[in-house]
Image (cartoon, rainbow, N blue to C red):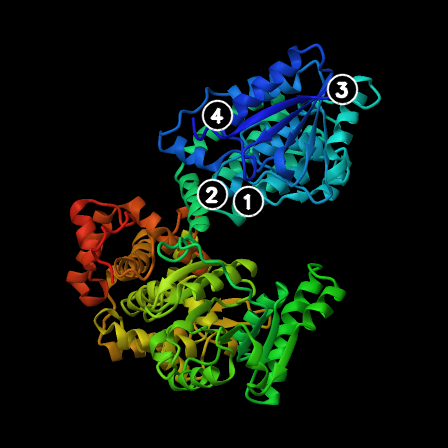
Amino acid sequence: MGSKKGRTMVEVGADGVAVITIINPPVNSLSLDVLQSLKESYDEALQRDDVKAIVVAGANGKFSGGFDISAFGGIQQGAVQQPKSGYISVEVLTDTIEAARKPSVAAIDGLALGGGLEVAMVCHARISTPTAQLGLPELQLGLIPGFGGTQRLPRLVGLVKSLEMMLTSKPVKGEEALGLGLVDAVVSSHELVNTACRWALDILARRKPWVATLYKTDKIEPLGEARQILNFARAQTRKRAPNLKHPLVCIDVIEEGIVNGPKPALYKEVEAFQGLLKSDTSKSLIHIFFAQRGTSKVPGITDRGLVPRKVKKVAILGGGLMGSGIATALLLSNYTVILKEVNEKFLEAGIGRVKANLGSRVKKGQMTQEKFDKTMSLLRGVLDFESFRDVDMVIEAVIENVSLKQQIFADLEKYCPPHCILASNTSTIDLNLIGKRTKFQDRIIGAHFFSPAHIMPLLEIVRTEHTSPQIIVDLLDVGKKIKKTPIIVGNCTGFAVNRMFFPYTQAGLFLVERGTDVYRIDRAITKFGMPMGPFRLADLVGFGVAIATGSQFIENFPERTYKSMLIPIMQEDKRAGESTRKGFYLYDNKHTASPDPELKMYIEKARSISGVAVDPKFVKLSEKDIVEMIFFPVVNEACRVFAEGIAVKASDIDIAAVMGMGFPPYRGGLMFWADSLGSKYIYSRLEEWSNLYRGFFKPCAFLAERAAKGAPLSAPLEMGKSRL
């Protein structure tokens, strides 16, 4: 039954209160062992004559981070046996703890998430520290609360707030929980257990109310009103997440308790939970959960025992959209930042962008004016390299021009101290080329942020064959501190994300030239779950960038790029995307996109240049075919990225696609999704299109090899094979 390290411990004080402590480091997660041990500790406390009341606490300042997620994976794969239906929710929590004839109080410090909060809610009162986090984040894993959370949270905080907490997975802090009625008192952590013990004795003496949460009704609205709230939540959910079933299941289970009473609803909750645990959505989201935590483990780098060095001061070259975004991300984590530009005008604009980024946080109430001033004081603008003599890291974020970048790196070496990390935010250019005129190749690394850099969660850390492991470990640490998910990738044109996704727009152009409607393609792709289709994305990025990066791919992968003149023709006519209010769409003052009837003219011109005629079957292409013709070339390129060792593991490619491009996490990332369709199927489709339309769709050797064996695309590479 999972690991044997999890347990609970009972200590009975002179006051007659048994303190049951949950012990399962690091976050006291509730493995099946812990829950079994909790039941045994309760049975013991209830039988002992010297125990009058009970307090439940967590070891080392954390109540409990919830059910052990690795056990979910085990249950899904059939490796861990599931306890009998309702055993934990009904027998242990409801019939043993909540129905006990001795009162119990939860002493909450640090975390009470998921199953942790559900255990706290079966106690007869809850005391918390002001900063403890309380929440039910199960929906993030494609599940619903399974230990009574759907029934007890609404009874403590009301329907509206409980729906919000469950559907958004956002926790509340102790202070807010007190106002909501989720906890009964807030005290400092060193008074926590003593206060909880006194409270438990007060319940016993009837000085404080003895409340069984499951039967509390004062916070629940009358039936008619409750149904209206639930229906509104359903409508919002369908709009926000049309491809997801589990949030609707959660709402149904909550409704069951309000209509038919809480006890039968507990069984419905368990049944729904077990059904969802077997769903593709849950398997995908649990895969993403572990894949994200695994990105910072790199064999041969992070297992050498290297300690990251202190990075205090960072210089950024270029205050454009990317440079100012990176500066904002660093400032928000209290780094001292020097921003260098070529002249006063550009420098002022760059600092203005940082101010605007931080200012929008003040407007949204995420930052106080005082914090804003303090954060801005960490930024200094300069026009020369003089102040670079004591910086720990430099990030170059100038335009994608090889000779300019080479000159900058040669200059940096003269001014920066010998320990300084020399990073480039290039999105496509080979780092060896950038550092060609630099002596110390071991300090050069790619720090590729995604736009807007202070918001997008991914950081691609690009290593060359010369980059020292110490520099990689240092940058991983900075990435973590600025709250990014880092993936470590090898050096090639486009690295992982941009390289995998270069066929995304190209496949779209291929379809359009053969008669598929631009707007139908974007609709099919957003319906699939992408934040935007390839054409809306091209507008957002801007045609200048699209042409510059596109030319890199045409130069480096000529045999598999689809060359269309559509974007250059439009750009010649002063249409460059959203920034010029005209691209594939027209844009109003509020950046709202609407279709442009004039687009047809440009498409016809591009067709005549390509020598392509409209093909009736492309005019009527099904949504499924659109999705496959857009994404299978992307999967094909991802296979090359994996086979060449550019990505360390397939799960890193999944995280790159989800966090860098907005691939739907509930599909498990690009490789995971591809494996759900099967390597044989993807290979046969690409092969069929390749025979009809040549190079662009040609399946790579790795894909052909995996399909021939019927092997998953994400299975690890055999050592020494397909590795660079």
From the top left corner, tell me how far across and down residue 311 is, in percent: 55, 67
User: Do the residues under discs 1 and 2 have CB atoms within 8 angstroms?
Assistant: yes
Q: Mark 2 points at which residue?
A: 244
Observer-nearest of 146 and 62: 62
Q: Foreground mark, 3 or 2?
A: 3
Left or right side of 12 for 280: left
Task: Kindly report which numbered mark, 4 or 2, lies closer to the viewer in this rendering.
Answer: 4
Quickly name the residue at label 3.
14
Of badges 3 and 4, nearer the viewer stands: 3
Q: Residues within 10 Å of mark 2 (few under 14, many from 20)?
A: some
Q: Look at mark 4 in the image and give the residue it sits on.
A: 271
Q: Nearer the viewer, residue 347 or 200?
A: 200
Q: First in sequence, mark 4 or 1: give its number.
A: 1
Name the residue type under label 1. Thr
Quadrant where the N terminus sits is top left
Label whose residue precedes the other's in the sequence (4 or 2): 2
Question: Pointer 1: what residue?
Answer: 237
Q: What residue type is labelled 2?
A: Leu
Q: What element carries label 2?
A: loop
Between marks 4 and 1 in the image, the one whose residue lies nearer the viewer: 4
The residue shown at (21%, 48%) is: 680
Within 10 Å of disc 3 (Cα), the crowding (few <14, some 14-19, many 20+) is few
